[in-house]
Image (cartoon, helix red, strand yellow):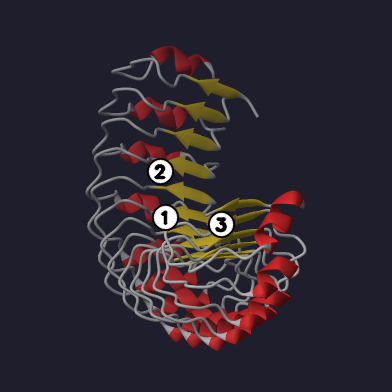
Amino acid sequence: MTTIDLSHQGLTSTPESLRENSGITRLVLDDNQLNELPDWLEELSDLEELHIDQNQLKTLPDSLSKLENLRVLALRANQFDVLPGWLWEMKGLQKLVIGENPLGELPEELGKLKQLRELYIHANDLTTLPDSIGNLEKLEILDAGHNALIEVTEALGDLKSLKHFLYLSNNQLSALPASLANLGQLRYLNFTHNQFTDVPEWVGELGELRELRIYNNQLTTLPDAVGDLGKLNELHAMNNKLRSLPGALGKLRSVVHLDLRNNQLPELPEALGELEKLSFLDLRGNRLTMLPDWVAGLPALKKLDLRWNKLDEVPEWVGDLEEGGCTVYL
């Protein structure tokens, strides 16, 4: 790949000397002061990647539609409130980055980009997603965080190839459609900083999930179904209103990182003593008055944080944990 990188140059226009480099396959113009692009960019017919993040663009020239080899288009952090219609006809696109713009909606034509594998639409002003998003059958990554979504279309459940991550954080969501249970390859799910009061039971059907981030909601408990996530490595549930935990969490034999800080837990289920791979356990800011003896038997524990609880006493075995290499915060 032939790359020309002109990022961070303070450019106010695209250097015309680029026209002499018709063999360019990757052009990077990130972090400049461009407010328009020239029509002659269409002459760079071999271009596969065009990166124009962090500029001042509001429009794109129609001539860019002639870049038939374009696979990656990155327009993050510009000033687009609408995108040109020809963009949705660029059917060879595999990665589209349009986050951090003032986009209020995405058209149904989005579903025409059937070769897309990565879609970044974060930090816009989106309140809904088009149903046609379900047509993106090759999509592996979707970042829709930091918008104003109040609901998510059931069509997301059609994204059977989605596997690397699904970000829905920092929206106004209180529920997710049951169709998301169909995302059987998904490894990372994040719906932090929303308005959820419970975790849907269907989460337990996401058998490939490695990391679940559900912090900063209004959760009072977790469903038994979470215990069905046999491959889960990390569970982040801090800053909720959890008052109890299901014993089913003891089935999470692959969990290494369990963050439960800043909840309202008065006790812990004995089943957590079965978490043989657990190395990080954060219980800060709960309502624990005693520490059960099974904690001492967690064979992989390397960090235990118990600060800001209401412990009546500290068990003697805490010293043994520390001697064994576990860092304990009291």
Distance Cα–Cα, label 1 vs label 3:
16 Å
Q: Residues within 10 Å of mark 3 (few under 14, many from 20)?
A: some
Q: Secondary structure at mark 3?
A: loop
**First along the sequence among labels 2 and 1:** 2
> Which residue is at the front of the view, 63 or 186?
186
The numbered mark, 2 or 3, whose residue comes first in the sequence reads 2
Q: Is residue 202 left or right of residue 285?
A: right
What amino acid is labelled 1 in the image?
Answer: Glu
- Mark 1–mark 3 CB contact (< 8 Å): no
> What's the residue at 46%, 28% (across, down)?
43
Q: Is residue 294 visible?
A: yes
Visible residue check, residue 93: no
Q: Are marks 2 and 1 in contact (CB under 8 Å)?
A: yes
Tell me the residue that label 1 is attached to.
Answer: 89
Place of residue 81 in the rendered image (x, y in percent of width and height, measured from the top left)? 22, 48
Q: Quadrant of residue 88?
A: bottom left
Distance (Cα) linking label 2 and label 1: 8 Å
Instruction: Say which amino acid is labelled 2.
Output: Ser
Q: Nearer the viewer, residue 108 or 55?
A: 55
Name above or below for residue 17 compared with residue 217: above
Which residue is at 34% across, 70% downward?
A: 130
Residue at horizontal 33 percent and vertical 16 percent from the top: 11
Q: Which mark is residue 65?
A: 2
74 w.r.t. 178: above or below: above
Please report contact status of discs 2 and 3: CB closer than 8 Å, yes or no: no
Q: What label does residue 117 carry, if any? A: 3
Q: Nearer the viewer, residue 150 or 102?
A: 150
Q: Residue at x 29, y 69 (%)?
A: 128
